[in-house]
Amino acid sequence: MKAPHYSVYATAKRENRKSFSLKGLDLNPLRYNLNSQMFNRSNLMTRFLKSSIAATALMLASTTAFAADQYSFDAGHSEITAAFNHSGISTQTIKFETFDGTIMIDKENPANSQVDVTIDTASVRTNIEVFNGHLQGGDFFDSENHPQATFKSTSVKQTGADIYTIVGDLTIKGNTQPVTLTAVKTFEGEHPLGQFIDVYKGAQYLGFRITGDLLRSDFGLGKYAPLTSDNVNIVINTELAKAK
């Protein structure tokens, strides 16, 4: 009779001891793996939300930083000219008839403005046809091998109420040099001829006179310098139309 009683007592005692030693612990491997996965997913979601917020903030900052209006040349009322001293006798001027570009202007923060201009070197013109051909040839622009000259701004700074300093890289004949230009705003607003001509009706315009100096020999155009002046004065008068 005692043996069964002892057996039941011992079994109960072992069960009580086992229950006591495992109290508060959950060793179910399936439940543990699920909890671990939930924890990892929670961390992953947190990292995703943080990344999304950062990306959104960056996008908003970029939009603000480049809140500029796009303008283009009114080619019929814009000109790019270069003046030089001709053999100590007089000042002569050449001009380029074909050019294009994109001008991004941020009125609130001019430093965000950008200027990108391309000039067709074969469009150079003087009052002498034979001289046009000489300028287009290898002694000067070499238009056949270098059909384009480009200017890309690297900085724009407002220095007065309507005055801006534009620094950029000018590339002519494969030679790139920094050039500093001074731009004076001459007009801003709706085109005055809008009341008479439909194409100008409601059109927003800017006017600028832009000047600067360079040494033509820096760009492989030094033929006859300094007898004919190396220094060249750039003058750009332009009307810019705001993109609709």
Image (cartoon, rainbow, N blue to C red):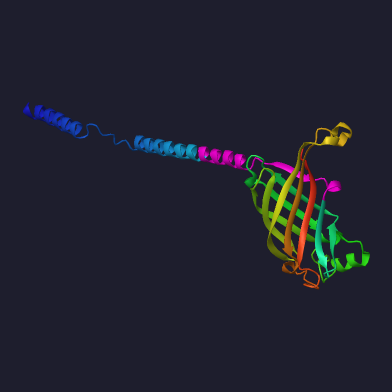
Q: Is residue 232 left or right of residue 127?
A: left
Q: Where is residue 68 in the image (x, y as percent from the top left)?
A: 67, 41
Q: Residue furthest front?
A: 89
Q: Which of 32 and 243 is in front in this view?
A: 243
Determine whether 12 is above or below 174 in the image: above
Magenta stretch contains residue 130: no
Determine whether 178 is above or below 44 in the image: below
Residue at 77% in and 58% down: 234
Q: Position of residue 41 (x, y in %)?
A: 44, 37
Q: Which of 13 and 50 is in front in this view?
A: 50
Question: Which quadrant would residue 132 be assigned to in this image?
Answer: bottom right
Determine whether 144 is above or below 59 in the image: below
Residue at 85% in and 62% down: 92
Magenta stretch contains residue 61: yes
How many numbered dots are placed on residues in this image?
0
* Residue stretch in magenta: 52-78
On-image quarter of the N terminus: top left
Q: Where is residue 239 in the image (x, y as percent from the top left)?
A: 80, 45
Q: Nearer the viewer, residue 186 or 145?
A: 186
User: Secondary structure of the magenta portion, mostly?
Assistant: helix
Residue at 36% in and 36% down: 30
Q: Which of 226 and 99 is in front in this view?
A: 226
Question: Which quadrant would residue 150 be assigned to in this image?
Answer: bottom right
Q: Where is residue 72 in the image (x, y as percent from the top left)?
A: 77, 45
On-image quarter of the C terminus: top right
